[in-house]
Image (cartoon, helix red, strand yellow):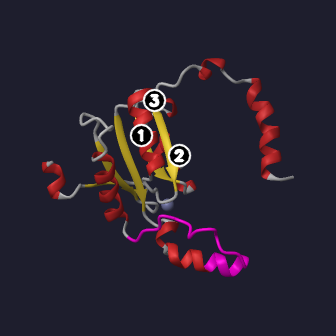
Protein backbone atom coordinates (compact mmCIF):
# COMPACT_ATOMS: atom_id res chain seq x y z
CA UNK A 1 0.00 0.00 0.00
CA UNK A 2 1.33 3.44 -0.86
CA UNK A 3 1.81 5.99 1.89
CA UNK A 4 -0.99 8.07 0.39
CA UNK A 5 -3.41 5.14 0.58
CA UNK A 6 -2.34 4.55 4.18
CA UNK A 7 -2.91 8.23 4.91
CA UNK A 8 -6.39 8.13 3.45
CA UNK A 9 -7.25 5.20 5.67
CA UNK A 10 -5.86 6.99 8.73
CA UNK A 11 -7.80 10.11 7.81
CA UNK A 12 -11.12 8.32 8.20
CA UNK A 13 -10.16 7.60 11.83
CA UNK A 14 -8.91 11.13 12.33
CA UNK A 15 -12.24 12.56 11.20
CA UNK A 16 -14.13 10.48 13.79
CA UNK A 17 -12.77 12.57 16.65
CA UNK A 18 -12.18 15.79 14.71
CA UNK A 19 -13.21 18.94 16.52
CA UNK A 20 -15.34 21.01 14.10
CA UNK A 21 -14.35 24.17 16.02
CA UNK A 22 -10.95 23.83 14.32
CA UNK A 23 -12.67 24.67 11.04
CA UNK A 24 -13.31 28.26 12.10
CA UNK A 25 -11.57 31.13 10.31
CA UNK A 26 -7.83 30.92 11.10
CA UNK A 27 -6.31 33.62 13.29
CA UNK A 28 -2.53 33.18 13.05
CA UNK A 29 -0.33 35.48 15.14
CA UNK A 30 3.02 34.92 13.46
CA UNK A 31 4.16 34.03 9.94
CA UNK A 32 7.05 31.56 9.76
CA UNK A 33 8.97 31.01 6.54
CA UNK A 34 10.99 27.82 6.66
CA UNK A 35 12.51 25.02 4.62
CA UNK A 36 10.63 22.03 3.23
CA UNK A 37 13.10 19.84 5.16
CA UNK A 38 11.18 17.42 7.46
CA UNK A 39 13.51 18.32 10.35
CA UNK A 40 11.76 21.70 10.45
CA UNK A 41 8.27 20.21 10.68
CA UNK A 42 7.85 20.30 14.45
CA UNK A 43 7.46 24.05 14.62
CA UNK A 44 5.18 24.03 17.70
CA UNK A 45 7.95 22.06 19.43
CA UNK A 46 10.87 24.10 18.09
CA UNK A 47 9.19 27.44 18.83
CA UNK A 48 6.95 26.53 21.76
CA UNK A 49 3.99 28.18 20.06
CA UNK A 50 0.58 26.61 19.45
CA UNK A 51 0.01 25.29 15.97
CA UNK A 52 -3.01 27.57 15.53
CA UNK A 53 -0.82 30.67 16.04
CA UNK A 54 1.57 29.74 13.23
CA UNK A 55 1.08 30.65 9.61
CA UNK A 56 3.70 28.42 8.02
CA UNK A 57 5.09 29.12 4.55
CA UNK A 58 7.52 26.51 3.31
CA UNK A 59 9.81 26.37 0.33
CA UNK A 60 13.15 24.70 -0.32
CA UNK A 61 15.96 26.61 1.43
CA UNK A 62 13.72 28.42 2.28
CA UNK A 63 13.67 30.73 -0.72
CA UNK A 64 11.86 34.02 -0.23
CA UNK A 65 10.33 34.18 -3.70
CA UNK A 66 7.72 36.57 -5.07
CA UNK A 67 5.12 33.99 -4.07
CA UNK A 68 6.40 33.88 -0.50
CA UNK A 69 6.31 37.68 -0.33
CA UNK A 70 2.69 37.55 -1.48
CA UNK A 71 1.89 35.04 1.25
CA UNK A 72 3.58 37.22 3.87
CA UNK A 73 1.50 40.18 2.71
CA UNK A 74 -1.69 38.10 3.00
CA UNK A 75 -0.62 36.70 6.38
CA UNK A 76 0.07 40.14 7.88
CA UNK A 77 -2.48 42.27 6.02
CA UNK A 78 -5.41 39.86 5.69
CA UNK A 79 -5.07 37.12 8.29
CA UNK A 80 -3.62 39.20 11.11
CA UNK A 81 -0.10 37.84 11.73
CA UNK A 82 1.87 40.46 13.64
CA UNK A 83 5.43 39.16 13.34
CA UNK A 84 7.54 37.45 10.68
CA UNK A 85 10.11 34.79 11.52
CA UNK A 86 12.51 33.57 8.82
CA UNK A 87 13.83 30.15 9.75
CA UNK A 88 16.87 28.71 7.99
CA UNK A 89 18.80 25.68 9.16
CA UNK A 90 22.17 23.97 9.13
CA UNK A 91 22.77 21.06 6.78
CA UNK A 92 20.28 22.23 4.17
CA UNK A 93 20.10 20.11 1.02
CA UNK A 94 19.88 23.28 -1.06
CA UNK A 95 23.49 24.10 -0.17
CA UNK A 96 24.72 20.83 -1.69
CA UNK A 97 24.30 21.78 -5.34
CA UNK A 98 24.07 24.84 -7.55
CA UNK A 99 21.08 25.45 -9.80
CA UNK A 100 23.34 24.93 -12.82
CA UNK A 101 24.66 21.61 -11.50
CA UNK A 102 21.21 20.23 -10.73
CA UNK A 103 19.81 21.37 -14.07
CA UNK A 104 22.69 19.64 -15.85
CA UNK A 105 22.37 16.49 -13.73
CA UNK A 106 18.62 16.16 -14.30
CA UNK A 107 18.90 16.85 -18.02
CA UNK A 108 21.41 14.03 -18.23
CA UNK A 109 19.62 11.54 -15.97
CA UNK A 110 16.18 12.06 -17.53
CA UNK A 111 17.42 12.62 -21.08
CA UNK A 112 15.15 15.68 -21.21
CA UNK A 113 15.85 19.36 -20.75
CA UNK A 114 13.45 21.52 -18.77
CA UNK A 115 11.71 24.05 -21.08
CA UNK A 116 13.75 26.73 -19.29
CA UNK A 117 16.53 26.24 -16.71
CA UNK A 118 14.76 25.50 -13.43
CA UNK A 119 15.20 27.82 -10.46
CA UNK A 120 15.94 25.78 -7.34
CA UNK A 121 17.19 28.77 -5.30
CA UNK A 122 20.24 26.88 -4.10
CA UNK A 123 22.58 28.84 -1.86
CA UNK A 124 25.85 28.38 0.03
CA UNK A 125 25.73 30.17 3.36
CA UNK A 126 22.66 30.05 5.63
CA UNK A 127 23.73 33.22 7.42
CA UNK A 128 24.08 35.22 4.21
CA UNK A 129 20.85 33.66 2.95
CA UNK A 130 19.04 34.79 6.10
CA UNK A 131 20.38 38.35 5.79
CA UNK A 132 19.27 38.53 2.17
CA UNK A 133 15.81 37.27 3.18
CA UNK A 134 15.48 39.91 5.90
CA UNK A 135 16.46 42.62 3.38
CA UNK A 136 14.01 41.29 0.83
CA UNK A 137 11.03 41.09 3.19
CA UNK A 138 11.86 44.34 5.00
CA UNK A 139 12.10 46.30 1.76
CA UNK A 140 8.67 45.31 0.47
CA UNK A 141 6.34 48.31 0.72
CA UNK A 142 3.36 46.15 1.70
CA UNK A 143 5.08 44.65 4.73
CA UNK A 144 4.25 47.17 7.45
CA UNK A 145 7.26 48.76 9.18
CA UNK A 146 5.83 47.88 12.61
CA UNK A 147 5.88 44.15 11.79
CA UNK A 148 9.14 42.72 13.18
CA UNK A 149 11.11 40.65 10.63
CA UNK A 150 13.72 38.45 12.32
CA UNK A 151 15.88 35.67 10.95
CA UNK A 152 17.23 32.55 12.66
CA UNK A 153 19.24 29.44 11.90
CA UNK A 154 18.05 26.17 13.43
CA UNK A 155 20.95 23.87 14.28
CA UNK A 156 19.84 20.36 13.31
CA UNK A 157 22.47 18.85 15.64
CA UNK A 158 21.47 20.68 18.83
CA UNK A 159 17.90 21.84 18.19
CA UNK A 160 18.90 25.40 19.10
CA UNK A 161 17.99 28.58 17.27
CA UNK A 162 20.56 31.29 16.61
CA UNK A 163 19.48 34.78 15.59
CA UNK A 164 21.10 36.33 12.52
CA UNK A 165 21.68 40.05 12.83
CA UNK A 166 20.77 42.02 9.73
CA UNK A 167 23.59 43.91 8.01
CA UNK A 168 24.50 47.18 9.77
CA UNK A 169 23.33 49.56 7.06
CA UNK A 170 19.94 47.92 7.29
CA UNK A 171 19.26 48.44 10.98
CA UNK A 172 19.79 52.15 10.36
CA UNK A 173 17.19 52.20 7.57
ZN1 LIG B 1 16.67 23.05 3.98
Q: CA distance from mark 1 to mark 2?
A: 20 Å
For the residue labelled by badge 2, is the local secondary structure a helix, a strand or a loop?
loop
Q: Secondary structure at mark 3?
A: loop
Looking at the picture, tell me which residue is in the foreground, 91 or 141.
141
Which of 62/153 is in front? 62
Whole-percent x, y for residue 82 in the image: 34, 31
Which numbered marker is on residue 42? 2
Which callout, 1 or 2, points at the residue further toward the start of the chain?
A: 2
What is the crowding at mark 2: few (fewer than 14 residues within 10 Å), some, or many (at least 20)? few
How many discs mark residues in the rendered view?
Answer: 3
Q: Residue at x 62, y 22 (%)?
A: 23
In this view, 72 is above or below 87:
above
Q: Which residues are magenta?
A: 105-124
List x then y, in percent, for residue 112. Answer: 70, 75
> Disc 1 on helix, strand or loop?
helix
- Distance in Å between CA atoms under marks 1 and 3: 12 Å
Q: Could you tell me residue 10's position as x and y percent? A: 78, 38
Residue that mark 1 sits on: 72
Checking the image for residue 28, the label placed there is 3
Tell me if 99 is positioned left or right of 83 in this view. Answer: right
Instruction: Tell me what residue is drawn at x 41 percent, y 56 percent.
Output: 88
Mark 2 or 3: the one toward you: 3
In the orientation shown, which residue stands out farthest toward the right?
1
**Does label 2 point to a residue whose CB lies under 8 Å from ligand 1?**
no
Question: In the rendered structure, does residue 123 fall within the stretch colored magenta?
Answer: yes
Q: Is residue 92 magenta?
A: no
Residue appearing at x 70%, y 79% in the figure: 109
The part of the image, by quadrant, that contains residue 153 is bottom left
Determine the image quadrant of residue 149: top left
The answer for how far apart the CA atoms under marks 2 and 3 are is 17 Å
Q: Is residue 161 visible?
A: no
Amino acid sequence: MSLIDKALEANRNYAKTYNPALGKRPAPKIAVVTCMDPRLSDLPGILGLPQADLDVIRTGGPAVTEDVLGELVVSTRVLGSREILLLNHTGCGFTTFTDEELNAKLSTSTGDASPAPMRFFSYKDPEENTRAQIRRVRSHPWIAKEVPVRGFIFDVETGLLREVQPAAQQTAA
